[in-house]
Amino acid sequence: MGTVAAVRPPQTLYVTIRRDELRQLQDERESLLLQVAQLREALQAQTLSAPAPQARLGN
């Protein structure tokens, strides 16, 4: 049998952030979300244009 540990509720951490830092983080997040969307689109286009795999019998 393992050791039983008491489970504590999660703690809240409060931080202070300047407005310019917040704006920079929001801009970076927006840029990353756009990049993810572009990469998904490219991957989907690549998947759709790729030839279907052919089953090979024997070696």
Image (cartoon, rainbow, N blue to C red):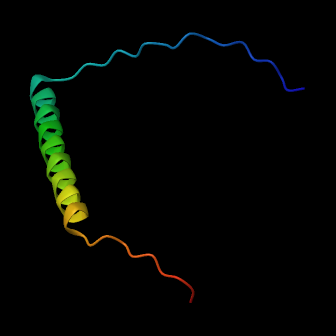
Identity of the residue furthest to the bottom in this view: 59
Say left or right for 48 vs 1. Answer: left
Residue 21 at x, y percent in the picture: 15, 31
Which quarter of the rendering shows the C terminus?
Answer: bottom right
Q: What residue lies at 83% left-to-right and 23% top-to-bottom?
A: 3
Is 17 located above or below residue 47 in the figure? above
Nearest the camera: 45 or 53?
53
Residue 28 at x, y percent in the picture: 15, 40
Q: What residue lies at 85% left-to-right and 26% top-to-bottom?
A: 2
Examine the image and state in which quarter residue 46 appears: bottom left
Q: What residue lies at 21% left-to-right and 56% top-to-bottom?
A: 44
Residue 51 at x, y percent in the picture: 27, 73
Nearest the camera: 40 or 36?
40
Examine the image and state in which quarter residue 25 appears: top left
Residue 17 at x, y percent in the picture: 21, 23
Q: What residue lies at 53% left-to-right and 82% top-to-bottom?
A: 57
Is 25 located above or below residue 49 in the figure? above
Say left or right for 22 vs 54. Answer: left
Is 46 located above or below residue 11 in the figure? below
Which quarter of the rendering shows the N terminus?
Answer: top right
